[in-house]
Amino acid sequence: MEDVYVTIGLEVHCQLLTQAKMFCRCSTDYIGKTPNTLVCPVCMGLPGALPVLNRKALELAIKTALALRCEILPEVVFHRKNYFYPDLPKGYQISQYDSPIGVRGVLEFTLEGEKKRVRIRRVHVEEDAGKLVHEGLGIEGNVSGVDFNRAGIPLVEIVTEPDLHSPEEAKECLIMLRSIVRYLGVSDGNMEEGSLRCDANVSVSLSPDVPGAKVEIKNMNSFRSVFRALSYEVERQAALLREGKVPVQETRHWDEVRQITVPSRGKEEAEDYRYFPDPDLLPLQISQEMLKEIQATIPELPLQKKERFMREYELTEPEAHILVQDRDLAEFFEACVREFPAPRMVCNFVLTEVLKNLNAHNITIRESKVTPSMLAELLKMVERKEIGISLAKGIFEEMFVTGMGARDVMAKKGIAFLTSERDLEKIVHQVIEENPQSVADYLRGKEKALHFLIGQVMKATRGQANPEVAKSLLLRELTSGE
Amino acid sequence: MNLCDFRNFTIRNYQDLFARGELSPRELLSIFLQRIREVDPLLHAFLFVNEEGAFARAQELEEKGKDKDTRPPLWGIPVAIKDNICTLGIPTTCASRILEGYVPPYNATAVERLEAAGAIVLGKTNMDEFAMGSSTENSAYGPTRNPFDLRRVPGGSSGGSAAALAALEVPLALGSDTGGSVRQPAAFCGIVGLRPTYGRVSRYGLVSFASSLDQIGPMARTVADTITLFEIISGRDERDSTCAPYPPFSRTEIPHKEEVRKMVVGLPREYFSGGVDSRIVRAIEEVLKGLEGEGLTIREVSLPHTNYALEAYYIVAPSEASSNLARYDGVLYGLREGGAGSLQDMYFKTRTSGFGVEVKRRILLGTYSLSSGYYDAYYLRGMKVRTLVRQDFEKAFEECHVLITPVSPVFPFFFGERTKDPYEMYLADVFTIPSAMAGIPALSLNCGYVDGLPVGLQIIAGPFQEGMLFGLALFLEEMLALPLPFPEIGQ
């Protein structure tokens, strides 16, 4: 794809983490709930019902816009976006049009260590629609149902400028965006569950000066499918151009099963949404105090954190990159370092053992039973050479499953501490007695024989001995013995 | 007790009878239900009579209200509700086929407050479909007739509430006013109707026609009863963002007679020029002479943008309506036709057969006005005219306390007289639309009869100045001492 120029812009929707919906008091906790149990006249769009803004949704949207370094507009105006669809109970969606929450922001991310920058065109807040259900209704015939539990949940929409130039960039940009909304606590950013949704505009051209046709891609339900759909689409458009054909401006759907994009039918054709200010909601002024208060709640963001980790803890870029992707993991790391100030060792252990166990159990660090103090305690024992690193790994697995501390795990498993040199001395004596040939070899100057003897001590202690201690005891016995 | 005794009654009189034990809520209910049975087949003011529910409610009130000193202000008083105001468990159709059989699962705030005040919902009144019209001829269930002359319209869109009051089928009613829908029928039926300041009464549960204009308004036979109703239904409501955060209206805001005598009354010259029936102008001039005699100052003022208000209204109101009525799509409630076909087919068939001609006309008008490329020239310009109209009033109120105008340029017209040309019908609201566009309160009051037909006088005041309206209306009512309507029906 060296011969083509790729331009990609993203349009991302995140469900905001409010307790109540955007314009009524129904709960937003809809996952797994019986359809149409979290509804009221307002979110069902019953005649006569009126929306009342949930201020929390507005605050979270402003927080997002501030974190993306947007200019915040002084007045919030809600517009109606008019179109017909069965999942839209009022026949219009309450959204924002020419007066969004924020404009002209910036998002930075890194791709293979290189810093990239994408401009944010706008951040606005709107309500979610219901969900069509086509299966499992228990009704005869070709029938669809609508579940309005999701209808009215607040969404923040983030639109980037077309500043991305490869599917890799688009994917990293999206991962950074998810990371940011999670850091902010404004959304759980879960693509599989639909709390983060992404559409993309892709255009491919033969020259950077000639813009390609804008093709909108929808229905990408994971980071992987974003990457695959965009890669497919770039290749499709590039192939057309190479054949001397021109891609048409259209909306296409990503078909996850066939792993291709297909033209969308019907609904999308040049719709006129007849936007106008919603007369049911009065314009709201955003005060400077309000902005200041919200600004104060914005934590250190992933990129800043990464740079600080590299500086403060001398981590490599890839190490810091992985650590900061998940705010909880980054905080786990830092908390552990606070108790055990050996960042290199903590980082190595977190990036290998902790992640391995999290993945194996498919849980997040927040859900795990191991606390930073517990890990610090374990690593301290390794540092004091009370246990070896391979034993530490095993102990950690057990800690991970049971939630017990390192010492409790050892006690339970009958793993003794080899702190007592007398215990070890006995074993050393025994090893020397049982291996006269090796002893003789060593005394004749064969260094290798010493390693064999250390190995025998380790074997006899089932790996629990500190090899350094074993070595010094052996040396003491061998050199003073005769 | 029989109905004739109630002719000049206010709520106070019923309460006195209740207090003396000479009348019970159930007895009162029976008398009104009997009246409805007698005259409503001719008038068709009601779309639904809540006989069973009302009796149950009356019985409950009687049981709970044994202590007459703790009875709420509307204890046992029947009230009629316009059919675009949601009533829990009682059909609410907006006089449209598309909502045939629709029963709301909740009460509008205004209804909730009436019930909390002890009122009994007697039934739902007829109207122009979705409040679009000035004669009730646009009701999908047939028009209401004017009790003064059955060949004539009662006005609209709250024609059912107005006719029911004039015929004494009910002592109190709620209407709704978007461009004059409370005031014009009140004028045509010789009763009292108030359009409150926009935001003074919660719209929660009022089925939206044009959200930035719709207001629920109290309607009654006397000014005193209108005040009582308004005190109960007004005031902040956290379920309506456009509802003003002020406490309910209180009669302490009403100026005393002596203060009224010091009022300066403005006469907007644009409301008295050509196109107004001269007999209406004469009737109002009579009243003005009387007021001058009582010491009030009459001053001519000008509202130069009056002529543009109507045009702008027919951009803004249909635009909002086109969006508000999008929800009637056959999916969730109400009529559904062509459900077995494609989605588009169902939308098309449901809306084609569910909406009447005038509703469709306004949906089309509004859809066009909001369309990309036309928005600036129509909707945006309409909103700008609205600002100018409001500024006209602000300026006028620098010179006077209230304005007096005719409510309607014409007398109640005959059925079919204005249905052929929609613009003719729209002109019937030419004097009620400007104040609606400005969001300010206005009251319609009967000021006399010409050839047996009532003449409506409109008093307009600045925002939240309902007290002024009531002050002058009470003064006029006493000064004119007109008999309350009790027309012979069906002769």
Image: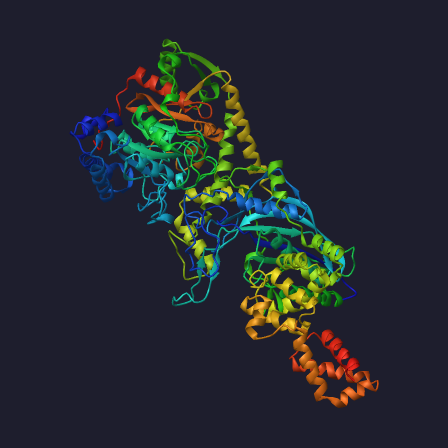
Query: Colour scheme in the image?
Result: rainbow
Instruction: Name above or below for residue A359 compared with residue A329.
Output: below
Give coordinates of residue A337: x percent, y percent: 68, 58
B226 or B459, nearer to the observer: B226
Tell me the residue at 47%/18% (across/down): B269
Quadrant of the image for the C terminus of chain B? Answer: top left
Give coordinates of residue B190: x percent, y percent: 31, 26
Say if residue A429 shows up in the picture: yes
Residue A436 placement: quadrant: bottom right
Tell me the residue at 33%/43% (across/down): B87
Residue B381 placement: quadrant: top right
Instruction: Name above or below for residue A356 compared with residue A248.
Output: below
Quadrant of the image for the N terminus of chain B? Answer: top left
A452 or B229, nearer to the observer: A452
Give coordinates of residue B119: x percent, y percent: 28, 35
- Position of B99 with respect to A29 (left or right) is left
Say if residue A252 shows up in the picture: no
Looking at the image, the residue that sits furthest to the bottom is: A437
Instruction: Name above or below for residue B312 compared with residue B96.
Output: above
Give coordinates of residue A462: x percent, y percent: 64, 80
